[in-house]
Image: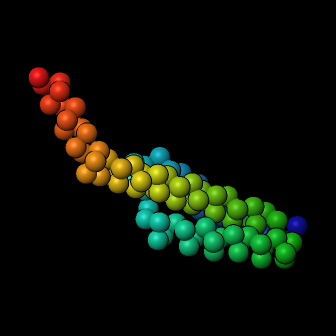
Amino acid sequence: MLWQDVVLSLGGFFVAATQVPMLRAAEKPPLATSMPLVFILTAISISLFSLDLKLAALGCVIQGTLWAILAVTRLRATREAAHFSSPIVLAEQHSASLDRAA
C-alpha cells in the first residue's frame, strides 16, 4: 500500500464525514454546487483507481455519493415547493378551506 493512498483516503473519509451535517440539515446546497461536484468526484475516483489508489478512490466515491444524495434531496424539495405554489394547487387549497368554513 502506498503512503499516498493512505493520506488521500484519510482526507477523503474526513471530508465525507463533514458532509453528514448537510445531509441532516433542512436546507440543502444549491444544485449548481452539488451536481458539478458529483461529476468531478466521479472523474477523480476513476483516475485514482487507475493509479491503484483504491482507498483514495473509495473516499471520493463516498463523497460523490453523498453529494448526489444532497442533489436529489434538493431537487425533490424544489419540485415539491413548485407544486405547492402553483396556481392550481393554491386554488384547490383555497376552495377546500372555504368548504370547511361553510
* Coloring scheme used: rainbow
Q: Quadrant of residue 63?
A: bottom right
65, above or below 89, in the image: below
Residue 94 point in image, percent of width and height? 19, 38
Q: Quadrant of residue 56?
A: bottom right
Tell me if I can see residue 70 in this picture. Answer: no
Q: Farthest residue in the left direction?
A: 102
- For the C terminus, give its image quadrant: top left
In the picture, measured across the screen, residue 4 lies left or right of residue 11, that is right
Tell me if I can see residue 67 in this picture. Answer: yes
63, above or below 101, in the image: below
In the picture, measured across the screen, residue 95 lies left or right of residue 28, that is left
Q: Nearer the viewer, residue 17 or 32?
A: 32
Residue 12 point in image, percent of width and height? 66, 64
Q: Residue at x 17, y 24 (%)?
A: 100
Q: Residue at x 47, y 57 (%)?
A: 75
25, above or below 49, in the image: above
Residue 95 point in image, percent of width and height? 19, 35
Q: Residue at x 84, y 75 (%)?
A: 50
Q: Nearer the viewer, residue 85 or 56?
A: 85
In the picture, measured across the screen, residue 41 lies left or right of residue 100, that is right
Residue 72 point in image, percent of width and height? 53, 55
- For the N terminus, give its image quadrant: bottom right
Q: Residue at x 29, y 52 (%)?
A: 86
**Picture mark count:** 0
In the picture, measured across the screen, residue 98 lies left or right of residue 93, that is left
